[in-house]
Amino acid sequence: MIRLLLLLPLLWACSDKPPTTPETRPVENPNAGNTAIYDVDPDDPYEIGSGSFMDMRPGDILETYSDRLAPGTLVNGEGEFDVYYILGRRSDTLGYVYSADERTIESIIIESTDAVTQDGIRVGNTFGELTERLGVVDVKGSEIEARVFATKAPFRYRLGMNAGPGPVDTSEIDPATPILTIEID
């Protein structure tokens, strides 16, 4: 009996399969929740192009992308809006598309940390990381809901803070302020 117990570790060691540990276990989405700034790599599931996302651009016809858009309603402080939610590969929602005329894409709003710009910026990064990566950005408060946007063409980054309408002094923005959305207009 003792010899059998001594042989068990030897049998496991001779197995042709590598051991499965938390470090070697495959994961379905390696970047889920990842907000680190780094250069874009092949593991990034969705890349935000220069003025496009998943091949969609403002001005494109909505019907062209019916396979990746699902109609819905967005309710916020400004009111209730008909939007088209952007579906990911696992039918998860990555953000939404707004269309004023219900025919063409007016703007694309990305809310998922799984999407990354060519500069390595994603939702969840901070204002400090944004300016570190992109340099000077134009920051303004909106007239409705006091939302704050940092702009560096071709994107607008909605920040997790409020301010009155007009320019915002960037020296007064906490570098830890998160990016809530990435928008393409």
Image (tube, rainbow, N blue to C red):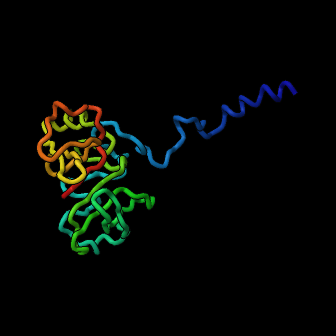
Q: Nearer the viewer, residue 51 or 19?
A: 51
Q: Residue at x 13, y 35 (%)?
A: 169
Residue drawn at x 71%, y 29% as measured from the top left: 10
Coordinates of residue 100 in the picture (x, y in percent): 22, 70
Q: Quadrant of residue 84?
A: bottom left
Q: Where does residue 65 sit, x and y in percent of width and height? A: 30, 70
Residue 68 shows in the view: no
Q: Is residue 108 visible?
A: yes
What is the quadrant of the C terminus in the image? Answer: bottom left
**Would residue 96 be found to the left or right of residue 130 on screen?**
right
Q: Residue at x 30, y 54 (%)?
A: 110
Measuring 78% from the left and 25% from the top, which residue is drawn there? 6
Residue 112 to residue 66: above or below? above
In the rendered image, which quarter contains the N terminus? Answer: top right
Residue 159: percent from left, percent from top: 26, 43
User: Which of the pair 34/82 is nearer the observer?
Assistant: 82
x, y percent for residue 158? 25, 47
Q: Is residue 175 above or below residue 66?
A: above
**In the figure, is residue 161 to the left or right of 93?**
left
